[in-house]
Image: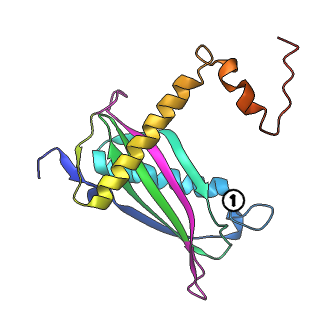
């Protein structure tokens, strides 16, 4: 393998933590903010392990809360780099919980964090090339690339200087809104 090339497996990180009452919200479920904090920690560890650099969270591309987590469950987070740019990486994170008494496991969350590697002076640092070794790795890379391209297009299409009301005025009427532009 080339010196400045790594595999997704080289970035793989797993953490597990028992969920305590102090992590719960008012409904007795584990607070989503606490889970996001754990996800940010593992995204940092994963991207730093891959790049060999200090990394910062640039954006959270997607967070899908699929199933609530209960107090007393063992939560496992698994992360790996799915995509690399010149200085950025997309880290895919899967969160599962396990009832440690029954052994029942459930998929609770999937997320994608975009992380940027930094040099000691705070400038962006180049990251190693990603060596993809499986068709699943190609799928994950292309899926991450597609998410990034969709985000760029959405920002462009809906930029306040580019947005056209006329393009969307009929479409918006199909939704649960009332249009009243009298103040304009």
Residue 178 is left or right of residue 109, and the answer is: right
At x 52% / y 43%, what residue is drawn? 60
Q: Nearer the viewer, residue 144 or 19?
A: 144
> Horizontal and vertical percent for residue 125?
30, 33
Residue 128 is left or right of residue 120, and the answer is: left
> Horizontal and vertical percent for residue 137?
30, 57
119 drawn magenta: yes
At x 34% / y 46%, what residue is drawn? 83
Which range is magenta? Answer: 97-125
At x 74% / y 28%, what residue is drawn? 170
Q: Up-down: is 1 above or below 107?
A: above
> Horizontal and vertical percent for residue 57?
47, 40
* Element on which disc 1 rests: loop
172 drawn magenta: no
Q: Which residue is mark 1?
A: 31
Residue 13 is left or right of residue 32, and the answer is: left
Q: Up-down: is 71 above or below 152?
A: below
At x 64% / y 66%, what residue is drawn? 67
Label 1 crowd (10 A; few <14 / some 14-19 / many >=20): some
Q: How is the image coloured?
A: rainbow
């Amino acid at each position: 393998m080339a010196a400045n090339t790594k595999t997704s497996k080289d970035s793989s990180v797993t953490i597990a933590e028992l969920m305590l009452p102090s992590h719960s919200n008012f409904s007795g479920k584990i607070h989503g903010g606490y889970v996001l904090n754990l996800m940010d920690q593992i995204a940092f560890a994963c991207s730093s392990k891959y790049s060999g650099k200090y990394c910062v969270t640039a954006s959270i591309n997607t967070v899908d809360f699929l199933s609530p987590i209960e107090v007393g469950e063992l939560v496992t987070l698994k992360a790996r780099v799915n995509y690399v740019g010149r200085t950025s990486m997309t880290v895919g994170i899967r969160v599962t919980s396990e009832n440690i008494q029954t052994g029942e496991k459930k998929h609770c969350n999937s997320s994608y964090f975009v992380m940027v590697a930094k040099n000691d002076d705070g400038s962006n640092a180049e990251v190693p090339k990603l060596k993809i070794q499986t068709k699943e790795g190609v799928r994950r890379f292309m899926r991450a690339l597609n998410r990034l391209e969709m985000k760029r297009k959405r920002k462009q299409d809906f930029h306040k200087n580019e947005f056209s009301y006329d393009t969307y005025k009929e479409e918006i009427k199909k939704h649960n809104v009332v249009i009243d532009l009298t103040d304009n």
